[in-house]
Image (cartoon, helix red, strand yellow):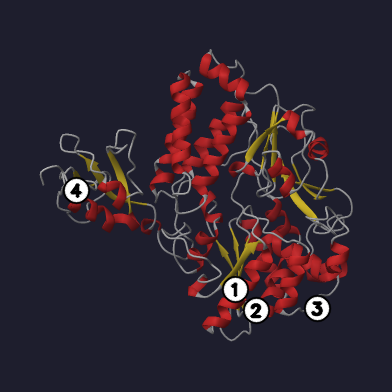
Amino acid sequence: MNEALPDVPEVRVVGLPQLTSGFDLVERLDLPMHLKVHGPLDPLGGEQLAQLAERISLKGRGGAGFPFHKKLRSVAESAIRRGVRPVVVVNGSEDEPACRKDTVLINRAPHLILDGALLCAEALGARTLVVGVTRESTQRSMEAALAERGLGNSRRAALRAWVRRNPVRMVTGAAASLIRSIDGGPAIPPGRKVSASRSGVGGAPTLLSNAETFAQLAIAARIGPERYAHTGLYDEPGTVILTVSGAVARPMVIEVPTGVPLRYVLRLAGAPPVPQGVLTGGYHGKWIDAATVDEAIVSRNSLDAVGGSLGAGAVLPIGQETCPLGESLRVAQWLAEESAGQCGPCYLGLPAAARGLEDVLAGGGPAALEALKQVANNVKRRGACAHPDGSAMFLESTVKAFTDDLAAHVLGNGCGRPVQGVLPLFEGGRAPTGVPGGADAADSGASRRRIHVDWTLCRGHGLCADILPEVFELGADGFPTVAQARVPRYAEAKALRAVRRCPALALRIEEDTRGQAPERNLPVLSKGRGRRAPGR
């Protein structure tokens, strides 16, 4: 059974170090040592900084890979147009069990991250800088780094800077979750999607990017784009930091130039010579098989071309002795448990997808496989954040990557191999918690109301799915796919509207009072779906 990774695993480097410079000298680069290793940094104007990011093809290193220069210019334009000061946010929330690159940077080179963030703050005229973290070690290191620079949260300071710590959960790493928590709300995504560049912290334009992204910017600002481009590929210059775990002898964080063969990285960590598969990009990533590993190099474009994903830089091989579908099932169950519990595709769809994969493993046959594919497809592009999309991508990749094992489970008695638990996981089953110092957990997730379908009345009008897609979706027969479900707290008003508008009066809302005193009584009303019933 694979144990959880430590906050700071072994760190290695291929070639000359950039982000990890000085790691061979000290465990943590405080400000004096940081300046000795990296030297001073001159400020840059906003357009200079954007041009630098564009010339080195800097993209976000948190998983999405959005071009940094576009984000920087968008924030600047929005701030000028609205006449408000923007905010800079460093996202150091690293909540995947298989990712440690940002945690290592914050713990060992926090000033490199602050260099990039402060460059942006000065160029944009920002007066607020927030660093989001989820671990005690990263909170301590970053707060110490701010103190070493004389930065704090004083109202009289030219730049207010502080650390915001959130619970360790998959969804707290989403940009919208971090912004919501900084504003005092729960660390879960809101029910609507708004660009942070237009309206982020306190409604101000917000430049939010991953910790490694700011560190890369600081390196490029010091050495210039020409020297930066001497490392790595011409179209993706520089280095990347990977976290390698799974079936390896030495789990590690490793800095490598882009263009290094993936098999070389795996060999350094002691992976099996011929892995059964390699999960690239983490638990929102994609599997590639052993033959594809030999073709892949470490770059975003290369991994995309062979069906993999750079994502957040996690690389996890598994050996021939374990069941790949069983390993993936453990991850799928954990992903379902990490739901914020506030939108149907995530709260209902991900557990259904995990059960679907479990049915396949249990010998459910082709019908179980088709049901799994349908559920995974249904959750995509419908959630309040990227968690359902990333989880669905992982499941679809699992089905495509391990066709022989899939056939053994679907058409036979299984592959005959045990599940060894080589993919690291946190303890699952935790309910979403409130943000320290922010809103209480009761203000987030599911409420104490349940919505029920009376099948003796339902006529499949479909209005409930139109009004309340967080809870209801229609099956192939045109009827709701669930008979009862908890209502997300933010959707209570929509649930009542669905009840009142149901043409067949087939819906009702009840308050779940199990284990707690009721808050208030709600009327028992009927509910329905969209079209008018014949004759009405």
**Contact, CB < 8 Å: mark 3 with mark 4?**
no
Earlier-in-chain disc, 2 versus 1: 1
Element class at badge 2: helix
Q: CA distance from mark 3 to mark 4?
A: 64 Å
Q: CA distance from mark 2 to mark 1?
A: 8 Å
Element class at badge 1: helix
Whether residue 129 is visible: no
Q: Is residue 248 above or below residue 31?
A: above
Q: CA distance from mark 1 to mark 3?
A: 22 Å
Residue type highlighted by circle 1 = Val
183 vs 430, nearest the viewer: 183
Q: How many marks?
A: 4
Q: Position of residue 483 (x, y in %)?
A: 27, 37
Q: CA distance from mark 1 to mark 4?
A: 44 Å
Element class at badge 4: loop
Residue type highlighted by circle 3 = Asp
Q: Is residue 302 above or below residue 53?
A: above
Q: CA distance from mark 3 to mark 2?
A: 15 Å
Residue type highlighted by circle 4 = Cys
Q: Badge 1: how crowded within 10 Å, few (<14), some, or many (20+)?
A: many
Q: Badge 3: how crowded within 10 Å, few (<14), some, or many (20+)?
A: few
**Contact, CB < 8 Å: mark 2 with mark 1?**
yes
Quadrant placement of the N terminus: top right
Earlier-in-chain disc, 3 versus 2: 3
Q: Badge 2: how crowded within 10 Å, few (<14), some, or many (20+)?
A: many
- Quarter of the image for residue 504 reads top left
Whether residue 407 is visible: yes
Tell me the residue at 54%/33% (across/down): 330
Which circle marks residue 124 in the picture?
Answer: 2
Q: What residue did someone put label 3 on?
A: 42
Earlier-in-chain disc, 3 versus 4: 3
Q: Position of residue 430 (x, y in %)?
A: 47, 45
